[in-house]
Image: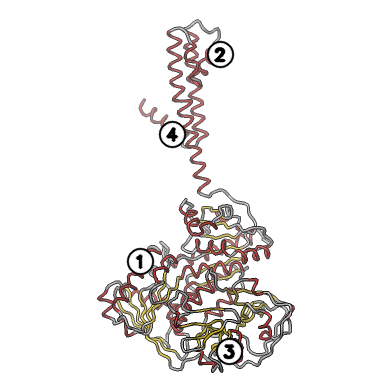
């Protein structure tokens, strides 16, 4: 019975201790009072030093809290009590108190570092989720100073502030950003908070309704499965939207969301019926891969347009003073930029009109789309000569009965969208073999969910491992026109996926004859750091997470870019294409870029740059986009023109 009562006392004491530092300090205070009262009572009863019990109690408290009084006492009994009280003081007052305060301070610091404290911000850029996109998104935002400055001006903000909501904030996250940004990292610009975008109380922690823009990046790797990624993003959109309706919000932030599956775009737009731009990663990357297979070298163009570099980018500006002027008459007004077309409002939505036909006249609310190195290059000259020229209809870019044999090594969630993309090109037929370790039955079941019937694609599944020499030799890779290495999203990380891809690429190059002129090789990587490994090797590289991160960042800062990218990279309409110089029947062997542009324009196309096939191995694919207008080019057999044409 006594033992049961003692256990009950320990249990109650444990419950009090676990309540936190305040209750722990209360227990220590009670113990100090008990020791002081007990020692004071002994000193009062058994010595003649004190005239009152309160005086002896105060004496005991002083000895308990300050060991410096120990030598002042006289008498053996009083010295004994004083010594015991002083020792207890070391244990209770100093040891326990310091331990409790240290533990409390550490707990408070961990809580602050974990990002649980709500913030109060306005017009900040909010990123919901830490994925293999997030670091690259932040890098683009920090480095795109001009575009960020114009974005902040449009929304009325003074400075850039990025808030990241991650499931768990650890020291590894800011360290990764510091490593990626280097000297550009500014901890005052970036705030981390812990939480889930699925929970409204966690969203309040990052002041989401006052954000200037909210980004929901996707991921190529998800523990629960990639299907869950889209589910979580759509649920987050619904959470944000419902909260705004309940609060009768007058303003909804712009949301830029990335989905893995393009078929869910209407669902996302239904979940958040306010300001939203949706980017489907499977559609975007599939388009880029398909176009690069059709036109070798386009990966260099994509990288320059979609990533932060010293090269060119796509810019959008409003020029109301040019109302009523034909857009092709404005070429001389922008000597350092190339006019790609315009955006026009139609039925409440922006319609991209790139490479517009002859006689196309600007309206007051049109926005002109430029290719330029920097925003200031899109400034119009005050005095310029309007040069009117007659443009023909753009040449057809169909290749009648064109056939290509394609080998895809690897498997990921983008495969159905990729096959579907190849099937959209009329009069072009693709024989596609897919080699992967994933069982054929599992792949066919995954493909069947798309319920698509291909007419321009002949598909064959092969089971094998492309990191196995014998498996690669068995399929005779030299017989193919193109070989594409797909990243392996079924692996655990970027590093594991790229390691397999790089190993397979090295084995393939060892198998292919040294003098082989085909196949053309395209490698999809997940980590931009690994691109350096391919600088001195044949083949092109597409870093899909990096490209998607930059698209997300660009669209967040200038949402109109989403429809421009869709137009550029989707089959039909305007398309970037390579033309041999001989195609245009130039009258001179050497011409300045301005002269080249005039001839190409008369044929109904827009020249974007020049490709020198003799310099394909220089790291840029020999491509010069938007060179100086007076730059001369020898128009020999190794020269191709990068043009914007229209797919008829």
First reached walking from the N terminus: tag 1 or tag 3: 1
First reached walking from the N terminus: tag 3 or tag 4: 4
Of circles 1 and 3, the one toward us is 3
C-alpha distance separating marks 3 and 4:
84 Å
Image quadrant assignment for residue 146: bottom right
Residue 468, position as x, y percentages in the image: 27, 72
Of circles 3 and 2, the one toward us is 3
Q: Callout 3: 10 Å neighbours few (<14), some, many (20+)?
A: many
Of circles 1 and 4, the one toward us is 1
First reached walking from the N terminus: tag 1 or tag 2: 2
Q: How is the image coloured?
A: secondary structure
First reached walking from the N terminus: tag 1 or tag 4: 4
Q: Callout 1: 10 Å neighbours few (<14), some, many (20+)?
A: some
Which residue lies under the disc numbered 4? 14
Task: Mark 3 and mark 2 in contact? Answer it, CB < 8 Å.
Answer: no
Which residue lies under the disc numbered 1? 499
Secondary structure beneath label 2: helix
Task: Mark 4 and mark 2 in contact? Answer it, CB < 8 Å.
Answer: no
Task: Mark 3 and mark 4 in contact? Answer it, CB < 8 Å.
Answer: no
Residue 475, position as x, y percentages in the image: 29, 81
Picture residue at 50% right of the left edge, 55% below the top: 178
C-alpha distance separating marks 1 and 3:
44 Å
Which residue lies under the disc numbered 2? 54
Picture residue at 54% right of the left edge, 61% below the top: 138
Compared across the picture, whether 185 is left or right of 474 comes to: right
Of circles 1 and 2, the one toward us is 1
Which residue lies under the disc numbered 3? 600
Secondary structure beneath label 1: helix
Q: Callout 2: 10 Å neighbours few (<14), some, many (20+)?
A: some
């Amino acid at each position: 019975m006594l033992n049961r009562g003692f256990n009950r006392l320990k249990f109650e004491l444990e419950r009090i201790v676990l309540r936190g530092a305040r209750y722990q300090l209360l227990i220590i205070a009670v113990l100090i009072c008990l020791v002081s009262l007990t020692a004071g009572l002994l000193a009062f009863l058994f010595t003649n030093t004190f005239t009152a019990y309160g005086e002896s109690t105060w004496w005991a408290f002083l000895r308990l809290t300050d060991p410096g009084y120990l030598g002042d006492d006289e008498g053996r009994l009083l010295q004994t009590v004083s010594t015991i009280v002083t020792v207890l003081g070391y244990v209770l007052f100093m040891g326990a108190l310091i331990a409790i305060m240290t533990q409390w301070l550490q707990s408070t610091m961990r809580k602050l570092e974990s990002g649980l404290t709500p913030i109060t911000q306005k017009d900040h850029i909010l990123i919901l989720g830490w994925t293999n996109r997030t670091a690259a998104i932040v890098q683009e935002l920090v480095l795109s100073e001009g575009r960020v400055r114009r974005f902040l001006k449009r929304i009325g903000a003074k400075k850039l502030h990025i808030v990241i909501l991650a499931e768990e904030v650890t020291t590894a996250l800011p360290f990764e950003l510091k490593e990626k940004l280097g000297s550009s990292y500014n901890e005052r610009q970036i705030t981390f908070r812990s939480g889930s975008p699925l929970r409204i109380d966690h969203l309040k922690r990052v002041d989401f309704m006052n954000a200037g823009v909210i980004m929901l990046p996707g991921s190529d790797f998800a523990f629960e499965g990639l299907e869950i990624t889209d589910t979580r993003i759509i649920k987050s959109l619904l959470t944000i939207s419902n909260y705004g309706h309940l609060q009768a919000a007058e303003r909804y932030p712009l949301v830029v969301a990335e989905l893995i599956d393009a078929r869910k775009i209407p669902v996302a737009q239904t979940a958040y019926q306010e300001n939203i731009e949706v980017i489907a990663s499977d559609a975007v990357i599939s388009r880029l891969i398909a176009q690069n297979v059709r036109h070798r070298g386009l990966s260099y163009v994509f990288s320059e347009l979609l990533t932060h570099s010293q090269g060119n980018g796509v810019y959008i500006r409003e020029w109301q003073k040019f109302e009523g002027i034909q857009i092709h008459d404005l070429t001389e007004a922008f000597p350092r930029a190339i006019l790609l077309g315009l955006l026009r409002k139609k039925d409440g939505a922006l319609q991209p009109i790139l490479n517009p036909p002859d006689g196309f006249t600007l309206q007051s609310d049109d926005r002109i789309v430029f290719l330029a190195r920097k925003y200031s290059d899109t400034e119009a000259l005050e005095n310029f000569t309007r040069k009117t020229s007659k443009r023909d209809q753009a040449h057809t870019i169909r290749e009648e009965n064109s056939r290509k044999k394609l080998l895809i090594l690897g498997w990921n969630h983008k495969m159905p969208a990729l096959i579907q993309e190849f099937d959209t090109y009329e009069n072009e037929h693709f024989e596609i073999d897919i080699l992967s370790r994933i069982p054929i039955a599992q792949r066919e079941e995954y493909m069947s969910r798309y319920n698509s019937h291909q007419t321009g694609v002949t598909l064959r599944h092969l089971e094998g491992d492309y990191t196995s020499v014998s498996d690669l030799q068995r399929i005779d890779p030299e017989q193919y026109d193109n070989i594409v290495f797909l990243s392996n999203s079924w692996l655990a990380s970027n590093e594991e996926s790229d390691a397999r891809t790089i190993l397979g690429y090295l084995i393939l190059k060892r198998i292919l004859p040294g003098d082989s002129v085909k196949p053309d090789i395209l490698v999809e990587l997940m980590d931009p750091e690994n691109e350096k490994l391919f600088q001195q090797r044949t083949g092109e590289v597409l870093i899909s997470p990096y490209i998607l991160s930059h698209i997300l960042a660009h669209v967040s800062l200038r949402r109109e870019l989403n429809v421009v990218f869709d137009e550029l990279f989707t089959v039909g309409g305007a398309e970037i294409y390579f033309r041999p110089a001989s195609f245009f029947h130039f009258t001179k062997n050497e011409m300045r870029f301005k002269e080249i542009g005039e001839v190409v324009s008369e044929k109904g196309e827009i020249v974007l740059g020049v490709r020198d096939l003799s310099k394909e191995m220089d790291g840029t694919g020999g491509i010069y986009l938007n060179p100086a207008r007076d730059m001369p080019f020898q128009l020999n057999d190794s020269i191709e023109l990068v043009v914007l044409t229209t797919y008829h």
